[in-house]
Image: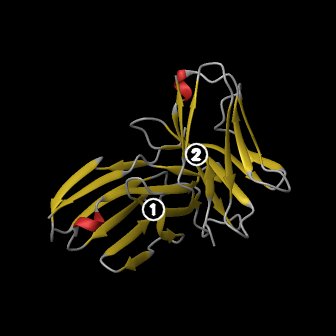
Amino acid sequence: ILNVEQSPQSLHVQEGDSTNFTCSFPSSNFYALHWYRWETAKSPEALFVMTLNGDEKKKGRISATLNTKEGYSYLYIKGSQPEDSATYLCAFKGGDNFNKFYFGSGTKLNVKP
Amino acid sequence: NAGVMQNPRHLVRRRGQEARLRCSPMKGHSHVYWYRQLPEEGLKFMVYLQKENIIDESGMPKERFSAEFPKEGPSILRIQQVVRGDSAAYFCASSGEYSGANVLTFGAGSRLTVL
């Protein structure tokens, strides 16, 4: 069984705080790592696609890094805003099956005004 | 572009009935994935299909569950003789090509409740 772990499970921060969370995945046979943002009552939406070791991606106040050799990716949010409140999912493709994405359970972020 | 359309959004079935969930992928997308989200759990892979072909069904329960993606029409996830444990949200996602670089575009999900 291939495990994709996300931590922490949930996070409560104040508006303006910067925060980060982790996605851990197998370090062998890496193919791709995606980050998705999932707001309540909506569909998950893609944030970043990462395919190369050392990739760094940025979109506004949100950025992500990738280390395929040690099997982790970090998502950073600078100056959190209430509208950042959502569940952040990572999805890993690799291992011995390149047909599917394995999703972590997500980090639920709540930003208090 | 209407995105990925799933219907019904909510479905209530009694134990033993059949549930059919439909997914129309985004225009131009030929790859469809079905995921299940059980209460308090993450998204679990069920099946990956291309037009008229099941590519990977390693996440599908062996019995009662089937999926298809015909040449014409939506992809259908079919659950026969539903049981209470089938109550979950079922999400469909589509992508344009087989590639790690192509993101999944998700539908809004179909929430199945089995009484």
Point 73% across, 50% down: residue: B75
Please state the horizontal and vertical placement of residue B47, each as a whole percent of the image: 68, 44
Give residue A57's mark.
none
Residue A51 left/right relative to B58: left
Residue under label 2: B35
Residue A68 visible in the picture: no
Q: Which kind of residue does numbered mark 1 sit on?
A: Tyr
Residue under label 1: A36
Could you give the CA–CA distance between mark 2 and mark 1, rounded to whole angstroms? Answer: 15 Å
Q: Which kind of residue does numbered mark 2 sit on?
A: Tyr
Q: Quadrant of the N terminus of chain B?
A: bottom right
Disc 2 on helix, strand or loop? strand
Looking at the picture, the colour scheme in use is: secondary structure
Point 38% across, 58% down: residue: A39
CA neighbours of label 2 inside 10 A, class few (<14), some (14 to 19), many (20+): many
Point 45% across, 75% down: residue: A55
